């Protein structure tokens, strides 16, 4: 079990740096929000916290994506990184630093790290031939591959053969296994640790850590032909952000390192194998914990562009509020497990738990204070549910020590249920007439319970927690000092005047989308994503060729169709809806561009073998090519 010692002065938590090949979705938000929850909790118990996130911006995939987008790599990454930076305040995420791998300071230190590894003898030059996934920036062995597809993303692999520098990963195999065995909390959850151990025991091969076939990366200082391999470049951000350098580690590094890395399970291998080996080689202490969380599906299906079911977190926050989303993500699924996102489930938890169990309790209590105590909270020494409160705090802290975020929320809501029962059992409306002193004890006790609850919920729903405290009349900060006062029942002062009432979570209604609405959203998403952002591999599959029109005639009984006889790599027929914008006689002899490898289809009984390249949505404008270009030439 990970024990969080309050005597420790600092706490360092990181997200992975996100690859800038797509806009932020629920998966990105989940990792960042989990790190934010951990950061806020450790601030609450009095630690000096450093919380890092950022973007990964180098590599062949980025260079190719920029080329497809018609931009230089710097323009491309600036635009994409901005989206990740801008989403943070919208989700109420309070990171200390946002790093980019294109930052000059980071690039300088990465070069120094390569130099140190080279001088130590942990890098050596060789030739590498293997199957490589551009999307994942990773090589795979034959044992990992099925049907020449990447085991991580499913895309087709390329055979890459080139000169490279290897990192002596195999050198650290036994040392890594020994460290994992002696540090049971190094990799969590336990089942993920077992997967890593099994992988390492199969035998580690030295790792290719440089490329010479593209330019978008950090040049190696001892061989300018070579560019840094993305994973050494990316993983080093966790120490370069702390001003680490092999020449001078720096005060910030000495203060905050080692880190807790929060990652998705798909990149655990890089963090739990490659990164520790690099740190061993550099003589740096390994991270405290690497915690791998699961994936989110949507209504039982994997998120994908083709299905158009990517959940965009900002759209949800605009509809339901930031705190509602934050609460749902960590209440719905045990942290570390896979989860299924359902908007209907989100609405249910908003109404039943946040609205009824928490929000209604607060409003009910404030109404009693207004009615029976002149809007002032009485201060009485006796405290109802004292043992229950102390147990809740203890169980809450234990849950955080095990990264059981759903359990932390669970114990808080058990206390809320007991508080609601307390009010019902004590019947304040009767105490007001029969025993005002006991009513004062009840009002004072519930105020203390709500103040404790607001602090316990603060890491998860910070805005709502602060609103609870303000409505209770507390004007201080939501920091460790305020938390200590709440735990000692000293946050509520004698005759403390309550603040203005505000409904925290108004009831929301859920309406199931119709089939037509869902199809429309998928179409809209596909138009935005699949057409604007396709992988370079997909682009390479399109065979564009110059074709000469050798015959053209209108298709009988059709207003728009023209049958074209064309010659490109071979003779073929294409049927296109371009009449009356183009007449058959004016097309004969012209050079056009066609998609030559489109699957044939039957149009009005005619086999059409390709598609013409044209611009314009309503009026087609064909792409014509100079007559001097030979038919069949590939358009690049």
Image (tube, grey):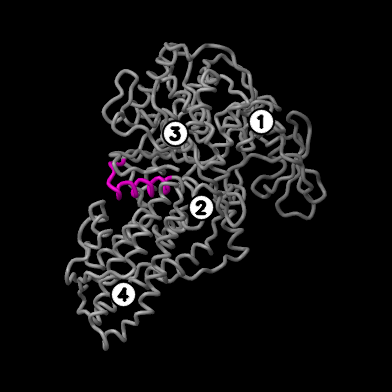
Disc nearest the viewer among 3 and 4 = 4
Query: Could you give the CA–CA distance between mark 2 and mark 3, rounded to whole angstroms?
Result: 28 Å
Location of residue 206 with respect to 186 vertically, above or below: above
Look at the numbered disc 1 and give the secondary structure of its residue: helix
For disc 4, the neighbor class at 10 Å (few under 14, some 14 to 19, many from 20) is some
Q: Residue 56 carries which label?
A: 3
Q: What stretch is highlighted in magenta?
A: 32-49
Location of residue 504 with respect to 395 vertically, above or below: below
Say which residue appears at 74% left-offset and 44% top-offset: 575
Query: Could you give the CA–CA distance between mark 2 and mark 4, rounded to whole angstroms?
Result: 31 Å
For disc 1, the neighbor class at 10 Å (few under 14, some 14 to 19, many from 20) is few
Q: Which mark is residue 144?
A: 1
Q: Does the magenta-highlighted stretch encompass residue 36?
A: yes
Q: Where does label 2 land, which residue?
A: 334
Q: Where does label 4 land, which residue?
A: 365
Answer with the quarter of the image where residue 367 lies.
bottom left
Location of residue 551 with respect to 281 vertically, above or below: below
Q: Earlier in the sequence, mark 1 or mark 3?
A: 3
Q: Could you tell me if residue 79 is visible in this image? A: no
Query: Could you give the CA–CA distance between mark 1 and mark 3, rounded to whole angstroms?
Result: 25 Å
Q: Which of marks 2 and 3 is nearer the N terminus?
A: 3
Q: Which residue occupies the foreground of this view, 537 or 441?
A: 441
Say which residue appears at 48% left-offset and 15% top-offset: 122
Q: Earlier in the sequence, mark 4 or mark 1?
A: 1
């Amino acid at each position: 079990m990970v024990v969080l010692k309050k005597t420790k002065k600092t706490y360092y938590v990181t997200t992975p740096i996100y690859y800038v090949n797509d806009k932020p979705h629920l998966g990105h938000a989940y990792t960042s929000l989990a790190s934010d929850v951990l950061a806020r909790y450790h601030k609450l118990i009095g630690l000096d916290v450093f919380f890092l996130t950022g973007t990964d911006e180098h590599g062949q995939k980025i260079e190719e994506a920029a080329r497809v987008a018609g931009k230089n790599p710097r323009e491309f990454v600036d635009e994409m990184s901005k989206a990740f930076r801008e989403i943070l305040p919208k989700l109420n995420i309070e990171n200390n630093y946002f790093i980019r791998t294109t930052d000059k300071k980071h690039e300088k230190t990465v070069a120094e790290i390569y130099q140190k590894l080279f001088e130590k003898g942990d890098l050596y030059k060789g030739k590498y031939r293997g199957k490589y996934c551009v999307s994942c920036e990773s090589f795979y062995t034959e044992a990992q591959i099925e049907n020449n597809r990447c085991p991580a993303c499913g895309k087709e692999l390329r055979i890459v053969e080139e000169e490279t520098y290897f990192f002596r990963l195999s050198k650290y195999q036994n040392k890594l296994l020994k460290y994992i065995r002696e540090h049971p909390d190094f990799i969590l959850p336990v089942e993920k640790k077992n997967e890593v151990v099994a992988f390492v025991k199969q035998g580690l091969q030295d790792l290719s850590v440089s490329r010479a076939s593209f330019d978008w990366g950090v040049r190696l200082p001892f061989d300018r032909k070579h560019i840094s391999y993305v994973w050494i470049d990316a993983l080093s951000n966790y120490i370069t952000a702390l001003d680490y350098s092999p020449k001078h580690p720096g005060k910030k590094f000495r203060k905050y390192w080692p880190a807790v890395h929060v990652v998705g399970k798909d990149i655990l291998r890089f963090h739990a194998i490659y990164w520790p080996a690099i740190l061993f080689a550099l003589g740096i202490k390994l991270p405290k914990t690497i915690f791998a969380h699961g994936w989110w599906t949507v209504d039982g299906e994997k998120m994908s562009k083709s299905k158009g079911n990517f959940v965009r977190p900002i759209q949800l926050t605009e509809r339901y509020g930031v705190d509602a989303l934050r609460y749902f993500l960590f209440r719905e699924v045990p942290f570390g497990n896979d989860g299924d996102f359902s908007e209907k489930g989100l609405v249910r938890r908003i109404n039943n738990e946040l609205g009824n169990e928490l929000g209604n309790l607060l409003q009910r209590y404030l109404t009693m204070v207004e009615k029976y105590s002149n809007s002032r909270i009485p201060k009485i020494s006796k405290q109802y549910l004292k043992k229950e409160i102390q147990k809740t705090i203890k169980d809450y802290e234990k849950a955080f020590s095990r990264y059981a975020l759903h359990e932390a929320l669970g114990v808080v809501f058990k206390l809320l249920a007991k508080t609601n029962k307390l009010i019902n059992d004590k019947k304040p409306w009767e105490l007001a007439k029969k025993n005002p002193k006991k009513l004062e004890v009840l009002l004072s006790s519930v105020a203390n319970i709500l103040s404790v609850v607001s602090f316990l919920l603060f890491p998860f729903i910070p805005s709502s927690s602060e609103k609870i405290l303000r409505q209770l009349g507390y004007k201080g900060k939501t920091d460790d000092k305020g938390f200590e006062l709440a735990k000692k029942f000293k946050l509520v002062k004698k005759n403390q005047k309550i603040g203005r009432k505000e409904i925290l979570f108004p009831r929301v209604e859920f309406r199931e989308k119709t089939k037509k609405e869902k199809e429309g959203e998928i179409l809209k998403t596909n138009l935005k994503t699949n057409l604007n952002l396709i992988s370079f591999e997909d682009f390479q599959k399109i065979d564009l060729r110059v074709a000469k029109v050798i015959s053209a005639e209108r298709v009988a009984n059709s207003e728009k169709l023209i049958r074209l006889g064309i010659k490109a790599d071979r003779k073929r027929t294409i049927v296109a809806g371009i009449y009356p914008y183009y007449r058959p006689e004016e097309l004969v002899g012209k050079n056009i561009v066609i998609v030559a490898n489109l699957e044939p289809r039957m149009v009005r009984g005619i086999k059409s073998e390709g598609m013409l390249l044209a611009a314009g949505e309503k009026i087609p404008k064909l792409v014509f090519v100079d007559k001097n270009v030979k038919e069949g030439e590939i358009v690049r």
